[in-house]
Every structure is written in structure tokens, then in C-alpha cells.
Amino acid sequence: MSKIKNEIMLITYADSLGKNLRELKDVLDEHYSDAIGGVHILPFFPSSGDRGFAPMRYDVVDEAFGTIDDVKEISKDKYLMYDFMVNHISRQSEFFKDFQEKKDESKYKDFFIRYKDFWENGEPTDEQVGAIYKRKPRAPYYEVEFKDGSKEKVWCTFAEEQIDLNMDSKVAREFIKDTLISMCKNGASIIRLDAFAYAIKKSGTSCFFIEPEMWNLLYEIQDTVKEYGVDILPEIHEHYTIQHKISEKGFWIYDFALPVLVLNALYSGKGDNLKRWLDMSPMKQFTTLDTHDGIGIVDVKDLMTDEEIEETKEAMFTKGANVKKIYNTAAYNNLDIYQVNCTYYSALGNNDKAYLLARAIQFFAPGIPQVYYVGMLAGENDIELMESTKNGRDINRHYYSKEEIRENFKNRKIVNDMRDLMKFRNNNLAFGLEGECITEVDGSKLVITRKCGEHIAIIKADLKTHEFTIEA
């Protein structure tokens, strides 16, 4: 297992850069040996839905991807991030199936949140439902039909394949601890806590980042993994102040606001909002422009005016390439108002100059950059895949063969330029996390200076023309 290094982390599915984990390693060795320091392998465990995010178990690798030994091979020279879905597990899991069959005789009878026990009268009032920060237009539940024919509601925040865990259950907490330890022993350098803010539920509240219980859970998880030298990263999409509150307590956080702020700067030719954000951003964070989900809108609330947010969102459709509003509707199984589904390259109109500048800004920003595999190859919107699945998010989930990747390097300058920029970010000591980031804006002119000790790197850019130079 490699420790976290201040080098670019790739985000990829196990079968998106080549057909499986072995081919993924081949791709990394052939093309990115010194351009990528870490890999976030998106959930590679047996799963019943949501492209791995409805895990049935964590003790084995999905056989379609390979084995844990294949994962460990990658971990020999890359630090790895694993996903733990702290909020939920698959309804196809042995835990839920046992509960469904045995009901109150099951060892897992309180593993899940049963409405009859959670709500005072077995059901929430309209007021209580209204208070919940939810992803559905109704109370979040799944109706279980037991073997004996009886039915009962259990908490279900996301899709019906993802049943929420009961954090008040001793058995569930033991499962969480055992799973984390297993990940630590099997190559994880950092564990991403997916949907972390939803994990604690309390009647009469939003059931989203409930304090102080969320802190108790976070510290409990930290105590479990720290003896193995492993870090944790809570995944939360919401107001930036939540991220910064977590940062102030010394944890790693995500910068999910940067993607829209950079788009806003490149669309408008103005960098004032971007400068304010970079000035307040901590170094102990992972930056993103793109992920396996969409481009988050909710994360920039109060960092831009509501009008600027709406204008930027609209520009993704008008200035972006091949992205339509219908792709973010029920017609494509996507009613998420918090994000827009589009590759970052296509959000910038498949414009090489604008895209390379966007990445350069990300690499100069405070923190460790994460680069999603489609973005690493400057991928355009995959309309064909999305139309075949009718899943809006698949627009940004293209499957690359090893041959297609080679063709990209052979025929597209932007892919080679991206790799060169990644190497520069990894190898220049000015980007040390103990250093500083100084941002200056004058109209469309943007200057970002990174300093660490005696080392300095400077980017000078024009947000309107997308021209930039780097001095180091």
C-alpha cells in the first residue's frame, strides 16, 4: 500500500480504461506511469445497481473486474482510494435477504431503519417529510415484503436497490468497522465515505449532516482506520461551509465548487468569483472538475449570485457541445436538480484551448487534483451510450478500449498536452501542500502563483482568449 502523495489522482471505473483491473494497470503503465500518482477505483465490489454504488458485499472483487490481487498490483506504485457506502447497502445483500426472510428473528432485524420503530406513529407527518433533505418527491422509503407475506417500510434515500443502514444498530456499526478494517488491509490508502451526510437520521430534522452525531461517526471511523495509516474523505455535495467546517477539524475534503467557478470564469471572461474561492480554499483537499456524476450546481451556492449560477448553468447547454436539457429529465432516468450531466470537455464546447486552461487552473489551485478518466482523455459527450441505456449520467461514462486510448494519443494533441500538464503538476516542488497559493485578477487577466519554500510556479492566463503561459 502506498501512502497519499501530492500527485494527481485518477478517478476511474475498473472497466473503463480497458476491460478490467489488469488492463487498467496496463494502461497506467503504458501511458501514465509518471503522470498519475494515485487512483480512485470506483466501487469494484459485487453490486446490484448504480454502477457499483449498491454493494452487496465488500470482501471480494466483482469477478468481472478481476481479484483483490489485481487491485494490490496497482497499489504497489499508486496510492488508492476505495469507496465505502456508509449510508446504505444493496437490498440483494445477504443482510437484507436474511432480514426479509426471518424478519424479527433475523440477526439483522435492526440493521436497517424500520419506519415502525423510527417514527413516533410508524409514519412521518407531512411536516416531518417536508423537513427531510431528500432525493425523492415523497418520504424516503422502500416497502419490504417479508417471507411471511407481511409488509413494512424501511428507509431508502436513493434508489430502491440501496437500503439505508441504521447507525443506532450495534450490528450495523460492527459491520462498518469490519468493512473498514478489511479495506485497510487490502490496499486502501484513503477511504471515501460515500453519501456520508445522509447517514444519521433524527425525527424532526433534515436528516442531513446532523450534529453532533455526524462528528461522532466521523471520529469513530477515523479511529478505526488510523492505526493502519489510512485516511478518510467524506463525500458531501452541499453548501461549501459544510466542507470547510470538516476541513477545520483536520480532515481531507473535496472541492466540488471549483468546476462551476472555472466554467463561469471561462464563459464570462471574469475571474473575480474564482479568485475569492481560491483565496479561501484549504490545501488539505482534493480538487475536481469532473467526476462519475454530473457537474454539481448546488456546491456554488453563495459563491456566485443566483443569477450567475443560472447563467452558467444555461451556458452549459448553449456553449457546451451536444448537451440538452432533456438529458437531465425523467426521460433519461435523471431528475437530479443538483447537477448537469455533461463531460467537462464538452461543457467547454470541445474547445482544446479552453479545456487545457481549465485543467491548468485546477492544477494550480490549492489541494491535490483529481482527474476523471473521461476528462483525462478530453472525452466528448457519449450520446450513443446514453441513448442506449437512457441513463443521463452515461453521457460521461464512455468505455475506452486499450486500442482507443492508443489512438487518442496518436491523433489528438490535447490528450498529449493533458498528460504533459499532469507530469508538470506532479514533479514541480512549488505545489507543496505546505506552501501558498496567490491569485490575482485584473479584468480577464488571471495570475496564480504557487510558492513552496524557494520553489515558484506561475500561470498567467487570459480568461477570454484562453491563452496562457506557465513560468517555473
Image: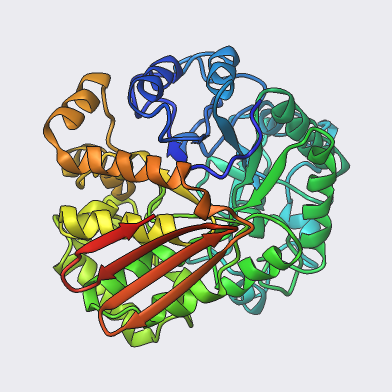
- The outermost residue toward the front is 454
Between 460 and 88, the one lying in front of the other is 460
Is residue 360 placed above or below 86 in the rendered structure? below
Quick check: 123 left or right of 425?
Answer: right
Residue 323, by quadrant, is bottom left
Is residue 86 placed above or below 28 in the rendered structure? below
Residue 445 % position (x, y): 28, 77
Residue 270 % position (x, y): 28, 80
Is residue 365 placed above or below 306 in the rendered structure? above
Quick check: 189 left or right of 136?
Answer: right
Tell me what residue is drawn at x 44 percent, y 27 percent: 14
Residue 263 % position (x, y): 30, 68
Quadrant of the frame with the C terminus? bottom left
Tell me what residue is drawn at x 44 percent, y 74 percent: 439
Kindly tell me whether residue 92 is visible in this rendering.
yes
Quadrant of the frame with the N terminus? top right
- The outermost residue toward the left is 411
Tell me what residue is drawn at x 19 percent, y 46 percent: 380
Quick check: 300 left or right of 442?
Answer: right
Between 299 and 74, the one lying in front of the other is 74
Residue 124 % position (x, y): 68, 69
Between 287 and 68, the one lying in front of the other is 287
Quick check: 439 left or right of 441?
Answer: right
Kindly tell me whether residue 145 is visible in this rendering.
no
Tell me what residue is drawn at x 73 percent, y 30 percent: 184
Residue 61, by quadrant, is top right
